[in-house]
């Protein structure tokens, strides 16, 4: 049985290949919870992720920093304590604003997720 409690410093940090100055930690993965995964994203100043789509929805909670985020055809400026919902298949992107890290929690269903960069066929 997986650990029910662990400290974030015990969890590996991996670079997000499609992102710039962007890292991810899988806080709760598919082997730990039957329904949802919880991930922490860390984007350094100047970082971001280009427009892409996913085959699972995203629920996100901003922990710190500021960013410009595109969801569909709308652009938002978000900050700590903002909450985002990104539906399945909707293009979205991230761009860090300011000189501090932008960090958020991202919860997704434990299903196969196909990621596709917008404009790549």
Image (cartoon, rainbow, N blue to C red):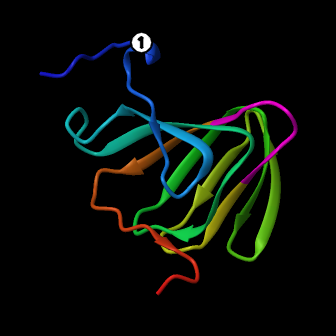
- For the record, the magenta segment spans 95-103
Rendered position, 78 above or below 89:
above
Residue 99 drawn in magenta: yes
Q: Position of residue 105 (x, y in %)?
A: 55, 37
Quarter location, residue 1: top left
Residue at 42%, 38% in the rendered image: 38
> Front-most of 81 and 121?
121
Tell which residue pokes out farthest to the bottom in this image: 121
* Residue at disc 1, secondary structure: loop
Residue at 30%, 37% in the rendered image: 29
Q: Position of residue 55 (x, y in %)?
A: 40, 69
> Front-most of 68 and 32?
68
Q: Check disc 1 and report the residue beneath it.
A: 7
Residue 56 drawn in magenta: no
Other-residue count near label 1 (Cα within 10 Å), few / some / many at <14 / 14–19 / ≥20: few
Decide if residue 48 is on the left or right side of residue 116. Answer: right
Q: Position of residue 17 (x, y in %)?
A: 48, 53
């Amino acid at each position: 049985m997986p650990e029910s409690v662990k400290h974030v410093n015990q969890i590996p940090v991996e670079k997000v290949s499609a992102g710039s100055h962007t890292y991810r930690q899988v806080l709760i993965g598919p082997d730990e919870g039957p329904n949802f995964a919880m991930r922490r994203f860390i984007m350094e100043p100047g970082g971001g992720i280009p427009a892409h789509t996913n085959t699972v929805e995203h629920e996100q909670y901003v922990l710190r920093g500021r960013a410009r985020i595109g969801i569909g055809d709308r652009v938002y400026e978000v900050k700590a304590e903002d909450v985002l919902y990104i539906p399945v298949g909707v293009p979205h992107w991230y761009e860090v604003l300011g000189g501090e890290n932008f960090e958020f929690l991202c919860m997704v269903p434990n299903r196969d997720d196909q990621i596709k960069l917008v404009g790549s066929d």
